[in-house]
Image (cartoon, coloured by chain):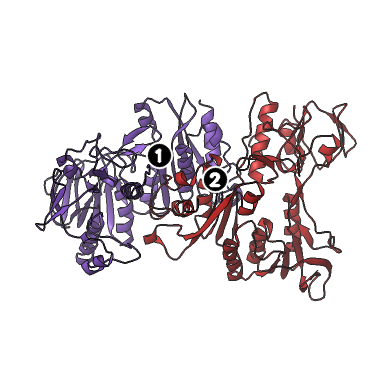
Chain colours: A purple, B red
Amino acid sequence: MPYYIGDVIKDYKRLVIRTPEDFKKTGIDVRIKTRVDGIDAAKGTVHLSDGSALPYDILVMATGAEAVKLGLPGEDLEGVFTLRNLTDALRIKSFLNEKRCRKAVIVGAGYIGMEMCEAFRNLGIDTYVLAKYLYPAPRWDAELSKLITEELEKNKIVFLPLTGSLAIEKGKDFALRLVTDKGNLEADIILIGVGARPNTKLAESLGVEMGRNAIKVDFFQRTSREEVYAVGDCCEVFHRVIGKWTYNPLGDVANKQGRTAGQNIGGASTKFPGVVGAQSFKVFNLEAAAAGITEEEALNHGFQPVSTIIQGLPVGRPMARGEKLALKLVADKTTGKLLGAQSVAEKGAVMRINCLSVALWNGMTLEEIGCLDLAYAPPFGGAWDAIHIAAQMLMRKL
Amino acid sequence: MPYYIGDVIKDYKRLVIRTPEDFKKTGIDVRIKTRVDGIDAAKGTVHLSDGSALPYDILVMATGAEAVKLGLPGEDLEGVFTLRNLTDALRIKSFLNEKRCRKAVIVGAGYIGMEMCEAFRNLGIDTYVLAKYLYPAPRWDAELSKLITEELEKNKIVFLPLTGSLAIEKGKDFALRLVTDKGNLEADIILIGVGARPNTKLAESLGVEMGRNAIKVDFFQRTSREEVYAVGDCCEVFHRVIGKWTYNPLGDVANKQGRTAGQNIGGASTKFPGVVGAQSFKVFNLEAAAAGITEEEALNHGFQPVSTIIQGLPVGRPMARGEKLALKLVADKTTGKLLGAQSVAEKGAVMRINCLSVALWNGMTLEEIGCLDLAYAPPFGGAWDAIHIAAQMLMRKL
């Protein structure tokens, strides 16, 4: 009988769970607002913050990840937020409702930065995004990230590249002031979105083996301790393209790992076959998506990467109304296999990357990808899709 | 040195070709408005309708397909059209411009019927679509085709199911009258869209071997005669899911076959690896897409099909505004492999089918498809995408 401990469980057996009473209806002993203070592995007991203890046969570590902070003076001032979970989101929402926010500063231009700048802007808030690097979404090639910068500009987001944060202070014209190496910036709200770090302390206290960054698991989500499983953002995942275990804290992966662990605890023998690093975000009218590895990662993992970028069309030429679709492919010169893909477009970027994710999953070569059978109709692509064109272009570099 | 014979060649070496003069700039001897009246295979000579003859070393049959007619009395009356090529489209366009068309009848509810009813409707023409079967787009499951019927109704297209055409006559209130087994229907324009048939007479006159429906070719696009290649809608194509040669007259496939033949004639040794039957069309605000084979085809080819249909979401639940995505999967009970997929949705149908086309290409099992790594973000899908949910549902029937 598994126990779930956490903030919120939704839609279990079609019950909508909002109150402690709702939890009882699930038939599962769910303890919300309860912290695990320690685990006695020898006795098989979890010690809870309410003073009680729970015995276990099987323990699932689903401790997730926490937002990385910058370690700046003033980072704990009111109005400075990170965003990792629903509680964070509700706190930000209440703050925006209570205070009259006119200006927001986001530190970091990753997924959180991109999604939240749109959210702030849609509330009419002047929004600044500040990053240490030259372009937003640095996982994408500079040529593709440039399109994202243009989209930010078009939507009146001020992007401040190559800017490091030094401190947060009380402001004069606005509630807060961010001190940077390029000058000061005042705002009513500051959101820090610079990444996530796995919560592994509890697992480490059990002596569970760690990977490079997170809890080490096998394909069955088992840790080095027989009775302990780990799932989600606190553990590693197998990356099929590089054939190694990596840290890839994404919600869909966590869901799949949870299902795998659940099935195995229930007596099945289910392997989680890993990921290819598929990811996406939307910012205003742009889709950005990527899968596999970048050229730099390819070099680091001993591949001989070649790459190409094409400016294609998301739809057939007769239907095109000026929309572009930028697609970058990375392949291995030795094997001709696709290693990675990135796309940015007003539409169709996620579709191309999802197709190429399936191609990466199966270790397809550029030659095969160059003549994949895709559902062709002019509203959805050309007879030669951007995928075909890019693969054929890149084949010439093999 | 290959010769191209046809109506229009576009964008060759970035030249836009509109006049005979333009053709000369290509450096290739292109004869437009020229029919091939016969081929002397022994001499290696093509006889043209202008009385001249052309010698050849290599001959490429790219004779395409022609629209199937109904063989009805009155089918040749002015205002009765089929639509297969650019010339047909221009003729229809001129007719619509010259006559004051108020009402259109389309016989057939396949791709031509679906795309053209939208085109007529957008010109303000009252449009009727008539079919022998119960639902439009009969390749799709009835449950999915029902969504298409609803979309037609919503856009004031009258769909007349289970109706057979008997004759075409001059009309009274409108220029033409279609006599059907359900009564008469008058209209200013009648479009017949009931399929295509390969143009194989010329190839047959050479004694080239035929497949079941079209010219038989190998993976290099060679026919049974060493010096004759065939490409496009006049020849067969290898279907990877059933492992057999089939007739699949689609524009993107034709393009790929042409490229393959061209490379091989030029001295390369390029195989065209075949298709998985990916196809799509748009009708008003619906996307319809399919790949692989239907349950019925699966039975005919000796598989043991199982299937499921889900009503999923094209986007993540928090972003959903009532849009549905219907997805049907067909798999083989013996191997657990996916055999086919169909989808109809306001958005996201083509994306799902394109992913599943790549899965079909690689012969993936439902188990693998159920945990494919797709680029997850709520604007583009759920953490469990419709693909995952459908695959996991169908796994239970294995």
Q: Is residue A118 left or right of residue A324?
A: left
Q: Nearer the viewer, residue A10 or A344?
A: A10
Position in image of residue B238 (x %, y %): 66, 39
Quadrant assignment, res A123: bottom left
Labelled disc at residue A238 = none
Viewer-nearest residue: B168 or B390 = B390
Q: Residues within 10 Å of mark 2 (few under 14, many from 20)?
A: few
Residue A193: x and y in percent read 25, 48
Dot 2: element: loop
Of all chains, the one bearing label 1 is A
Q: Which residue is mark 1?
A: A276
| Placement of B4 over or under A152, stated as above or below | above
**Residue A321, image x and y in percent?**
54, 52
Q: Residue at x 58, y 37 (%)?
A: A371
Q: Residue at x 58, y 70 (%)?
A: B154
Q: Quadrant of residue B125?
A: bottom right
Reading the image, the residue beneath label 2 is B334
Look at label 1 and name its amino acid: Val
Q: Residue at x 35, y 31 (%)?
A: A297
Query: What's the CA distance linking mark 1 and mark 2?
Result: 28 Å
Q: Judge whether residue B12 can be spotted in this image.
A: no
User: Percent x, y for residue A87?
Assistant: 22, 58
Decide if residue A184 is in sight here.
yes
Q: Is residue A345 above or below residue A50?
A: above
Query: Which quadrant holds the N terminus of chain A?
Result: bottom left
> How many C-alpha atoms fall within 10 Å of the one at disc 1: few (<14), some, or many (≥20)?
many
Q: Residue furthest left?
A: A51
Image marks 1 and 2: residues in contact by CB distance under 8 Å: no
As shown in the figure, which amino acid type bears the numbered disc 2?
A: Thr
Q: Does label 2 lie on the same chain as label 1?
A: no
- Helix, strand or loop for disc 1: loop
Furthest residue to the right?
B51
